[in-house]
Image (cartoon, helix red, strand yellow):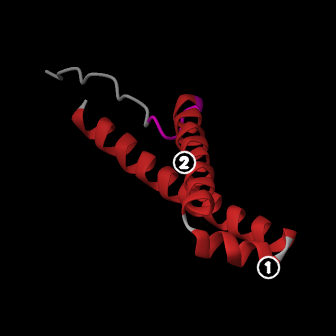
């Protein structure tokens, strides 16, 4: 006699909800990177001086680097959280 298995729950990363979760984590990381960059520019005179002498391009590269780094880090952290959440249930 065969016993019925419970239906497999699809992996939440593959679903649209999983993609939305990852994008949400990336946006939170980008916002944190932007806030950190602005706080660093306002609170550290050495950074502000370097960016003043570097021109518009220096500010753009500085901010894009911070925003991208924080966004990638938050996305990878969100990925770990989603996988851990899937293993619990």
Numbered circle sitting on residue 32: 2
Q: Where is 2 relative to 79, above or below?
A: above
Q: Position of residue 57 (x, y in %)?
A: 84, 72
Q: Secondary structure at mark 2?
A: helix
Q: Position of residue 58 (x, y in %)?
A: 78, 74
Q: Can you say which quadrant of the picture contains the N terminus?
A: top left
Q: Can you say which quadrant of the picture contains the C terminus?
A: top left
The region drawn magenta spans 12-16
Numbered circle sitting on residue 53: 1
Give the residue furthest to the front. 45
Query: Quick check: is 13 in the magenta stretch?
Result: yes
Q: Position of residue 34 (x, y in %)?
A: 63, 51
Residue at 57% from the left image edge and 37% from the top image edge = 24
Q: Is 13 situated left or right of 30 in this image?
A: left
Of residues 30 and 2, the one drawn nearer to the viewer in this rendering: 30
Answer whether labels 1 and 2 touch (C-beta < 8 Å). Answer: no
**Quarter-of-image position of residue 52:** bottom right
Query: Quick check: is 35 in the magenta stretch?
Result: no
Residue at 58% from the left image edge and 48% from the top image edge = 35
Q: CA distance from mark 1 to mark 2?
A: 25 Å
Of residues 23 and 70, the one drawn nearer to the viewer in this rendering: 70
Give the residue furthest to the right. 56
Q: Position of residue 87 (x, y in %)?
A: 26, 40
Give the residue furthest to the left. 1
Of residues 83 and 24, the one drawn nearer to the viewer in this rendering: 24
Q: Secondary structure at mark 1?
A: helix
Q: Main secondary structure of the magenta part?
A: loop
């Amino acid at each position: 006699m065969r016993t019925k298995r419970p239906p497999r729950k699809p992996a939440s990363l593959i679903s649209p909800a999983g993609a939305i979760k990852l994008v949400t984590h990336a946006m939170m990381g980008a916002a944190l990177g932007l806030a950190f960059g602005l706080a660093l520019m306002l609170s550290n005179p050495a950074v502000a001086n370097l960016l003043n002498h570097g021109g518009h391009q220096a500010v753009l590269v500085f901010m894009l680097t911070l925003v991208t780094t924080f966004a990638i880090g938050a996305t990878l952290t969100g990925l770990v959280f989603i996988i851990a959440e899937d293993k619990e249930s």
